[in-house]
Image (cartoon, rainbow, N blue to C red):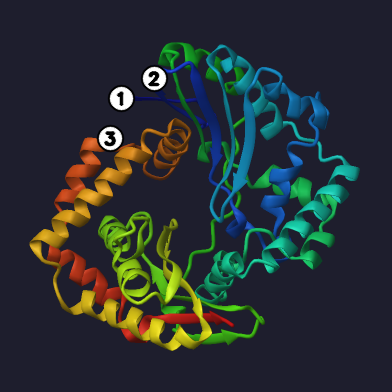
Amino acid sequence: MEFHTHRLENGIQLIHKQIDSPVAHCGLIMNTGSRDEEEFEHGLTHLIEHLIFKGTKKRKAYHILSRMDDVGGELNAYTTKEETCIHTTFFDNYYARAFELIRDIAFNSVFPQKEIIKEKEVIIDEINSYKDSPFELIFDDFEELIFAGNPIARNILGTESSLYNMGIETIQSFYRNNYPTNQMIVSSIGRYSFKKVKKYFEMYFYDLPLREPLKQRELYNTNSYKAEYREVFKGTHQAHCIVGMPAYSYNDPRRLTLHLLNNYIGGPGLNSKLNMVLREKRGYAYNVESGYNAFSDTGAFSIYFGTDKKDLKKCLSITRRELQKLASQKLGTAQLSKAKKQLTGQIAISAENNESQMLSIGKSQLVYNKVDDLDTICRKIDAITASEIIEVAADLFDPDKISTLIYH
């Protein structure tokens, strides 16, 4: 697995991996997300992600949407709490077309007033659809609970009130001042050589002026966290529950150990610990999962399950008991070996998805300024010890650190 990189004078980087496939994937990943908003700007980065498709200095919305579709390609974007990404998949004859379009919509958007009004309504519909889906809403509410007081706590979509109060001046000011070029990566996977991709990269991104960040991201103060227990009446048929706590950042050396522990507890494998004890053994829950999201200065670990209301207390008790076992009893040699093989196998399978890999290597280059190949990742996972796992479990799964949010 070989990656090639190149940085322009304006700070924008290119990372490319050559593969034997006529289908290419590329994206522009920007280190700007919803946590970079002020309170009165809540939902603005996601609104901008919608609006950049609605008109540039030389294209109307139809021409933007048709540019890749006309040649059988796909164009999309997403916003997270720490990044915004525009990405496209296409037959590799159209690299120049893809790079030119991404540059145009990322740097030349004009935000037509009628499109602003329309997209606000679209996003409000999206917000309301979340309210109708407790399984999705509870994750946002849980992060608001554990990160209270910091911008990272706020959901990505914003609120009906915050969206309606945003004018064109607020949108344009944020767009000008919050997307620094020295925190941008163009990520690419395709059959073309690095030399050829670099030529197109320089053609369309070289002349952009350097933009440096005008403000620092507000860091999360880990000392401000206090575990909470909260129940919210939603009138749902099931009880929905999340337990968890703030966790480790991208740069914490314990991050990979927590990834392994998370996969063991409630990862996608049907034999995960909680799936076995809650679903397979007792039939208490249909859906059980755990998750670990790392951010630049903190992270979030959570366990979710949905259950019949009469089984809620039993599910909570079993979950807490399993966490305390992990914090006090080392995994056996066979258990640890199986957990490592499962995680490395999942990573290897994920790497077969070229679009996902394009996004992954771009984010790695943005965050770490490097990309580990599969062999390196496997070696790091294999080096994790049972002692390291129990130390992480003991640190995070202290009963005094665990927050609980329940919808019923």
CA gap, disc 2 and disc 1: 8 Å
Q: In this view, does 175 lie to the left or right of 187?
A: right
Place of residue 154 in the rendered image (x, y in percent of width and height, measured from the top left): 61, 67
Q: Kindly identify the amino acid type of the residue bearing the numbered disc 2.
A: Gln
- Seen as rendered, the residue at the extreme left is 333
Q: Name the residue under label 3.
A: 373
Q: Kindly identify the amino acid type of the residue bearing the numbered disc 3.
A: Asp
CA gap, disc 2 and disc 3: 14 Å
Quarter of the rendering occupied by the C terminus: bottom right
Residues at circles 3 and 1 in contact by the CB criterion of under 8 Å: no
Q: Kindly identify the amino acid type of the residue bearing the numbered disc 1.
A: Glu
Which numbered disc covers residue 2?
1
Which numbered disc covers residue 18?
2
Sequence-wise, which precedes: disc 2 or disc 3?
A: 2
Place of residue 113 in the rendered image (x, y in percent of width and height, measured from the top left): 89, 44
State the residue at coordinates (32%, 62%).
Answer: 262
